[in-house]
Image (cartoon, rainbow, N blue to C red):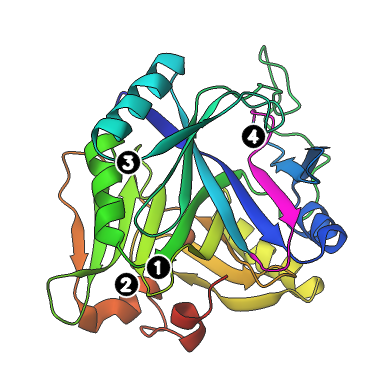
Amino acid sequence: MAITGVLRPGHFQMRVLDLQQSIDFYTNVIGLKEMGRDTQGRVYFKTQDERDHNSFIIREADEAGVDFVGFKVADQATLDKLDADLRAYGVHTERIAAGEMLETGERVRFEIPTGHQIELYAEKTDVGNGMPYVNPEVWVPDAKGINPVRFDHCLLYGPDIDGARKIFEDVLGFYLVEHVLMDDGEADLAIWLTCSNKAHDIAFVRHPEPGKLHHVSFLLESWEQVLRAADIMSMNRVSIDIGPTRHGVTRGTTIYAFDPSGNRFETFCGGYQTYPDQQPIKWTFDQVGPAVFYHDRKLNERFLSVVS
Ligand SMILES: [Fe+2]
């Protein structure tokens, strides 16, 4: 498919309790590259293979959780159009000047009905992945830790997931890939949305508290890499929530674990490719177990109750 408009999740800013401990964790265990620090005390990372300057940003705070999720759009004209479209739809937007984040252009920020801050931007400096754009090798051999391919998606918890879905579908061009129904058989408990042909670019679960983070996710290249990630987590005494296992939803293979601040993260592989003409897959409430954890066929208590 031609990808236009919103291209992909591009950056994710998260709060941590101890900055230095988190820098050590994301550098040495996850294997991200530190790319810079700003005057606000934020620390910027990207994966080895990502080409834009940064994708994952942390700042120290008293509470863990997500500050905002940024999506890269095709160009400045698209940014201006989507800003106008959001306003016409009744969404209040604000512009954040270029340079407020390192190596990042102007951003359009707005709040969605789940209480999360979402951003759009068109420009982020291309610093490359350590290999030339002409005749590259296939990977850079100095990677540390789990070494994911990219920041891939996040799962957010908040109250009005229907309102959030409408903005993503009606204004930003996302479409529904899968959903899990509540026990009334009608309302959605959870939705998976994409702006590309990935099985999900963002997902939501209905939850009474606004603005919560369930997990931020990093893509790996293979199931073997998921197993290796679990080995690295164990070596480093990382608190694993569940896995390695597989989701029924998206069919991805996965591990959920917690960073030193209690933010849940996922390292995963796979998920099928989807297209906007395909009808969404629906899971009924009695099958929520295999939908989320296909092998165990039941949720663990932490999955629903622990958020940051
Ligand atoms: Fe995920």
Q: Disc 3 or disc 2, which is closer to the eye?
A: 3
The kind of residue tagged 2 is Ala
Look at the image and tell me in which quarter the C terminus lies: bottom right
Label ID, residue 288: none
Among numbered discs 1 and 4, the one appearing first in the sequence:
4
Which residue reaches farthest top? Answer: 134
Is residue 300 inside the magenta stretch? no
Residue 167, compared with residue 247, is above or below; it is above
Would the CB of label 4 be found within 8 Å of ligand 1? no
Residue 125 place in picture, x, y as percent: 66, 22
Q: Which residues are magenta?
A: 51-64
Among numbered discs 4 and 3, the one appearing first in the sequence:
4
Residue position for label 1: 247
Kindly report the distance in space between the C-alpha atoms of the residues bearing marks 1 and 4: 25 Å
Residue position for label 4: 50
Q: Residues within 10 Å of mark 3 (few under 14, many from 20)?
A: some
Residue position for label 3: 91
Residue position for label 2: 291
Q: Disc 3 or disc 1, which is closer to the eye?
A: 3
